[in-house]
Image (spheres, grey):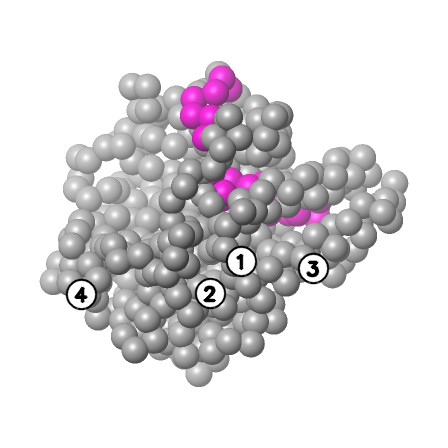
Amino acid sequence: MTDTPSLNAEIKVSSKHLISWLTEQALPIWYAQGTRQNIGDCFETISLDTSKGVHIDRRARIVPRQIYSFLEGAELGWNGPAEEIATALWTWYESAYATPEGHLANAVDMHGQISDNSFDLYNHSFALFGLASISRTLPKLAEVSEKKAKRILDFLTSTYRHPIAGFREANPNKTPLRSNPHMHLFEACLAWEAISDDPTWSDLADEIAELALTRFIDPVNGGLREFFGLDWLPMPNDSGRAIEPGHQFEWAYLLVKWGQSRKDSDALIAARRLYEIGRTYGIDESRGAAFMALNDDFTVRNPVARLWGQTEWIKAAVALASVSIGPEREAYLADIPISVKALTAYFENVPAGLYTDKWYPAGTFEDEPAPASSLYHIVCAISELNDFTKSL
């Protein structure tokens, strides 16, 4: 069965509109109001009331996410000073978040002083991802960026390695262990694998994929869980039951990428099941959006729909359409405009280039500043969709 021309055209139009929103509205305001050019840092959020950056502590995770967003945005057609922004942000990041213990602090205040010194694997996963973005898009910084990335990975390996697989939390006995930081570490490894000859990145990607397929994903229902004990079994309390639709989609997208490169049919089967769970049980019919969490019996655990879940739905639909044929491909293709519509609902009734983050079952959106952390999700979805439309 061939693709439906009208559906292909709709997908192309959706992609074009998203790129226009990103390059003409979002990146300009996140540069002008989301960064401080005189300092080289960035804000955690932008106020929907004033369209100005909000003076609160900045989490470590947002800096490499913003670096990626500006650099990838330039690849998609933004004509702003992406290289200048990215290099300034990384210079500030290295200086402000470095700790004597060797890890990256969790947050700094508006004066550039560490306000939360705690270790989080999640932050380091994004540091590796941000460095991969710099290496890929700024060739003159490629070699030094990979050296910095290897130093971060060496630190994680020497300090936080888990004896079974993956990585621990801040101390040997801290629980829960989490699948989410490993997902972003997996993402970072695949990004490095695409541009580096060092087998370290592929080896770690393989390890995390195996951890996902054998531990994170429930062997009975096929859903991917969030929280685990020290033995990588689901937490025995209620937290061990949590399954997030957005993460079903996000892992599906990553496992398709990895499964294709390894010719691993089990990964592709798992990805399809993850998508099926997210699509069947994690989309609220009245809003048409992916909500936050399910229980392990697929009943609703948290009905709030976060923006990022919609971006992961787009990416998963695109990834699975690219490896499917016939009616199955058509079904994934049909989901792309639906998931784009879910995402763009967050762009409405706010200043141009900004967005809301939380959508409640009653249909209302949380009135709060736009988080910088969401821009990375949006840019990644737009980039994946743009690449896919070239094949239609």
Q: Position of residue 40 (x, y in %)?
A: 31, 74
Q: Which mark is residue 244?
A: none
Cβ atoms at labels 2 and 4 below 8 Å apart: no
Q: Which mark is residue 111?
A: 4
Q: Vertically, is 150 above or below 366?
A: below
Range drawn in magenta: 298-322
Residue occupying image coordinates x 25% and y 54%:
56
Find disc 3 in the rendering and name its residue. 16
Label 4 SS: loop
Label 2 SS: helix
Residue 25: in sight, yes or no?
Answer: yes
Q: Earlier in the sequence, mark 2 or mark 4?
A: 2
Q: Residues within 10 Å of mark 3 (few under 14, many from 20)?
A: some
Label 1 SS: loop
Give the residue type at disc 1. Ala
Give the residue type at disc 3. Lys
Find disc 1 in the rendering and name its residue. 352
Instruction: Depth check: give the residue in front, 339 or 241.
Output: 339
Marks 1 and 3, how far apart in space?
17 Å
Find disc 2 in the rendering and name its residue. 29
- Which one is closest to the eye, mark 2 or mark 4? 2
Instruction: Depth check: give the residue in front, 392 or 178.
Output: 392
Cβ atoms at labels 2 and 1 below 8 Å apart: yes
Q: Residues within 10 Å of mark 2 (few under 14, many from 20)?
A: many
Position of residue 82 in the picture relative to residue 164 (left or right): right
- Which one is closest to the eye, mark 4 or mark 1? 1
Marks 2 and 1, how far apart in space?
8 Å
Cβ atoms at labels 4 and 3 below 8 Å apart: no
Residue occupying image coordinates x 63% and y 63%:
20
Q: Vertically, is 34 above or below 39?
A: above
Q: Vertically, is 36 above or below 347?
A: below
Q: Position of residue 68 (x, y in %)?
A: 45, 64
